[in-house]
């Protein structure tokens, strides 16, 4: 029997159903994700249908291409920064099967279209078809429907090609710096768009916004969503041109994904160059533990975590996310905000986001966590070592972020207090995510893609991160009030108070979660062990 696209779709649905069977929390997350997707779809449909209800063609020509570009950017950045990608069908598992490469790519691409994000995107963008039907009749609606379908294919192709490319780059130690720079540049594109939108809305420069929309309509980001409007405006000649452009970009993305996917299937991680020679005069075991760490159980675990955070592609992806958001978000908020001073709430978000990397810290280990269970590592020692391993990379970044924020807002004297707020948010965030990582851990798929998540994993990751962020904002309210009401006092007392506040919260979290981990080691191991 010949293998076709339908077999991949059926396999994806069966794996998804099997993953939910007997897993109450996964079913709950799936239902919650379905409800959120339905709300987003209905809201998107309503907003995109408004120009048609108003019978305003110019408004439609402004709103539809910009909304389409926003949808594309969401598919581009959200999997990298927040939700990950659902890779229930791990490409590496098909490496030994006699499948044609074209069949494999087509099947995996079709399976990617089966899911809540794709369904919500399709339903939401159908509001553009409603607008085109009201403005130009059934012909315009039919052409717009083709454009919406092409736009969905392009969204999925962009997401899969980019995440697969970064997965390949992050697996190669030689290419990790290039991957970091590329991701930072891509994420930086959100800032200018945000500033342009805020400036346009504040100055009500709708004519300028319309000109921007006209340009976007001739890019792959907006072209598929303006085909019906071209029929309405009497520009039928533009439809085949834009359609050819969109299909050409789609084929290029699929070709790019195909190239990186083949490397993932073959396990090609690249050659990282000549190995460093072992330092003479030291035992092999001693070389694994740096001199600045104690040569005991805590030091060995910390050395392992430090090495894993630098070499493991999943953890490195989390560090890259924190680096991009931590440096760019406060700057853009400070520049676009009309109020003077440092953005206190954003600083709390940045500090808590760094701690959120540990929300599923045991999921990174998977079945390898069995070694720690068998060795009987005390919970407090285990958690302290994991926190220290992450802090080696996070803590040096906090003064750098504070220096940049203080320079941008023109308040260099506020840099110590900014460091204090970041440290407080980081400590509070750690205190929150430690029990979350023990109670609400989930297994990660055994896939080469560091952004891959099993069914329901994207919702779990998003909810855990949001829970840590909101919790940190609530717990640090006293510090935020002090920073807002007593600015002079906060400038000289913010650093010591922030360090004490965050440190106290972290010590309390370690004490309480350590005993919890001691009681739940076997259950935690069973939870983070991926099903085959």
Image (cartoon, rainbow, N blue to C red):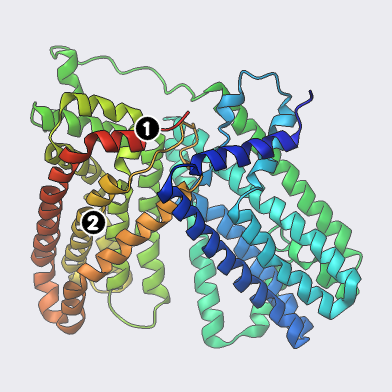
- 383 relative to 117 in the view: left or right: left
Residue 341, x across and y down, in percent: 28, 78
- 6 relative to 521 in the view: left or right: right
- Identified at 55% across, 59% down, the residue is 34
* Observer-nearest of 261 and 376: 376
Res 82 visible: no
Give the number of the disc on residue 261: none
* Front tag of 2 and 1: 1
Res 20 visible: yes
- Against 511, residue 210 (above or below) is below
Residue 109, x across and y down, in percent: 68, 41
- Against 314, residue 296 (above or below) is above
* Observer-nearest of 119 and 67: 119
Question: Callout 1: helix, strand or loop?
Answer: loop
**Which residue carries the number 1 mark?**
529
**Circles 2, 1 touching at the beta carbon (< 8 Å):** no
Mark 2–mark 1 distance (CA, rounded to whole Å)? 23 Å
Residue 499, x across and y down, in percent: 12, 60
Mark found first going from the N terminus, 2 or 1 = 2
Q: Mark 1: few, some, or many residues within 10 Å (few <14, many ≥20)?
A: many
- Identified at 91% across, 67% down, the residue is 236
**Which residue carries the number 2 mark?**
432
Q: Quadrant of the N terminus?
A: top right
Quarter assignment of residue 103: top right
- Identified at 87% across, 75% down, the residue is 232
Question: Callout 2: helix, strand or loop?
Answer: helix
């Amino acid at each position: 029997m010949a293998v076709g696209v339908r077999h991949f779709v059926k396999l994806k649905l069966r794996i998804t159903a099997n993953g939910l069977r007997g897993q109450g929390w996964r079913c709950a997350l799936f239902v919650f994700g379905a409800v959120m997707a339905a709300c987003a779809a209905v809201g998107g449909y309503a907003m995109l249908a408004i120009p048609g209800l108003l019978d305003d063609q110019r408004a439609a020509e402004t709103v539809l291409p910009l909304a389409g570009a926003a949808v594309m950017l969401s598919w581009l950045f959200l999997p990298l920064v927040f939700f990950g990608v659902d890779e229930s069908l791990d490409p590496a598992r098909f490496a030994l099967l006699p499948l044609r490469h074209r069949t494999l790519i087509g099947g995996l691409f079709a399976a990617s279209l089966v899911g809540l994000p794709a369904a919500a995107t399709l339903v939401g963008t159908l509001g553009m078809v409603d607008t085109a039907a009201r403005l130009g009749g059934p012909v315009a609606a039919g052409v717009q429907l083709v454009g919406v379908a092409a736009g969905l294919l392009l969204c999925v192709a962009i997401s899969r090609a980019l995440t697969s490319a970064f997965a390949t780059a992050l697996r190669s130690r030689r290419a990790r710096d290039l991957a970091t720079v590329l991701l930072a540049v891509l994420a930086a594109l959100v800032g200018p768009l945000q500033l342009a939108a805020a400036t346009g809305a504040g100055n009500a420069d709708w004519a300028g916004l319309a000109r921007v929309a006209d340009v976007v309509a001739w890019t792959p980001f907006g072209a598929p969503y303006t085909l019906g409007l071209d029929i309405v405006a009497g520009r039928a000649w533009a439809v085949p041109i834009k359609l050819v452009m969109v299909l050409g970009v789609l084929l290029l993305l699929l070709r790019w994904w195909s190239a990186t996917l083949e490397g993932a299937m073959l396990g090609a991680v690249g050659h990282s160059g000549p190995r460093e020679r072992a330092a003479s005069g030291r035992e092999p075991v001693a070389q694994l533990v740096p001199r600045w760490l104690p040569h005991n159980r805590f030091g060995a675990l910390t050395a392992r975590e430090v090495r894993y955070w630098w070499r493991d592609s999943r953890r490195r992806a989390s560090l890259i996310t924190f680096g991009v958001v931590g440096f760019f978000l406060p700057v853009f908020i400070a520049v676009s905000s009309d109020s003077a001073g440092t953005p206190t709430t954003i600083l709390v978000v940045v500090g808590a986001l760094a701690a959120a990397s540990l929300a599923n810290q045991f999921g990174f280990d998977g079945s390898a966590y069995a070694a720690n269970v068998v060795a009987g590592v005390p919970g407090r020692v285990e958690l302290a070592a994991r926190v220290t391993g992450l802090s080696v990379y996070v803590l040096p970044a906090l003064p750098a972020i504070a220096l940049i924020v203080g320079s941008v807002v023109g308040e260099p004297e506020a840099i110590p207090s900014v460091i204090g707020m970041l440290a407080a948010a980081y400590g509070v965030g750690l205190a929150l995510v430690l029990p979350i990582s023990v109670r609400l851990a989930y297994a990660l798929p055994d896939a080469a893609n560091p952004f891959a998540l099993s069914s329901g994993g994207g919702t779990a990751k998003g909810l855990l991160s949001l829970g840590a962020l909101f919790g940190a904002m609530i717990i640090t309210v006293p510090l935020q009030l002090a920073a807002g009401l007593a600015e002079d006092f906060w400038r000289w007392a913010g650093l010591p108070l922030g360090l004490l506040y965050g440190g106290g919260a972290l010590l309390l979290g370690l004490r309480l979660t350590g005993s919890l981990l001691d009681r739940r080691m076997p259950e935690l191991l069973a939870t983070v062990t991926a099903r085959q």
